[in-house]
Image: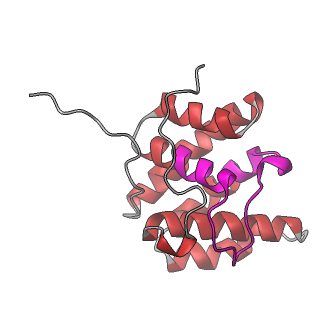
Amino acid sequence: MATHGLPAWPWTGSDAEALPTPERLLLDAARLWEAEARAGRPPIPALRLLLAAGDAPAALLPLDALLRAAPTQARDFGCELCPRVQPAEAALLLACALAQRGHRGEALAALLRWLPLGAAYAAMPAAIHLGCALRRAGVLLRQPLRVARRS
């Protein structure tokens, strides 16, 4: 599958505080998950409160499944207080936004840019479930693809 032609994600290296609220919630959750995993603690209890505060508690298990599918070296996320969005974090945001909007082929391509082949395929169902859970909670990620309108 070709992974070129996908949009350059505008938030790589940008200020994390400037992210829209849905993307910031997903970024904070991913960073917290990774911090807990690196510390040897189970990530789910720590995420429960964060996602409940963001009105997205149903996103807990799909996010956990998605991040568990990613190899440790691919989860090169910033610390919880890191001011800039890291490339791996931007890739996660892109894949989840595409999956949430129903662009499954493009979401898989975004995952393939970030993860090895097997991990990308393993993460895809979780990305779809995460997008659905966020959408049901009213947490809509930015539309990363511009669709040309037909006249």
Q: Is residue 71 magenta?
A: yes
Residue at x 58% of width, y 37% of height = 110
Of residues 76 and 84, the one drawn nearer to the viewer in this rendering: 84
Q: Which part of the image, by quadrant, shows the C terminus?
A: top left
Q: Looking at the picture, how far across and down is residue 144, in whole percent?
A: 41, 45
Q: Quadrant of residue 63?
A: bottom right
Would you place residue 21 above or below residue 123 in this image?
below
Residue at x 46% of width, y 58% of height = 134
Q: Looking at the picture, how far across and down is residue 120, in whole percent?
A: 69, 35
Question: On the picture, is 35 further left or further right than 21?
Answer: right
Q: Quadrant of residue 85?
A: bottom right
Question: On the picture, is 58 further left or further right than 112?
Answer: left
Magenta region: 66-95
Residue at x 55% of width, y 60% of height = 59
Q: Which residue extends farthest right?
A: 40
Q: Which part of the image, by quadrant, shows the N terminus?
A: top right
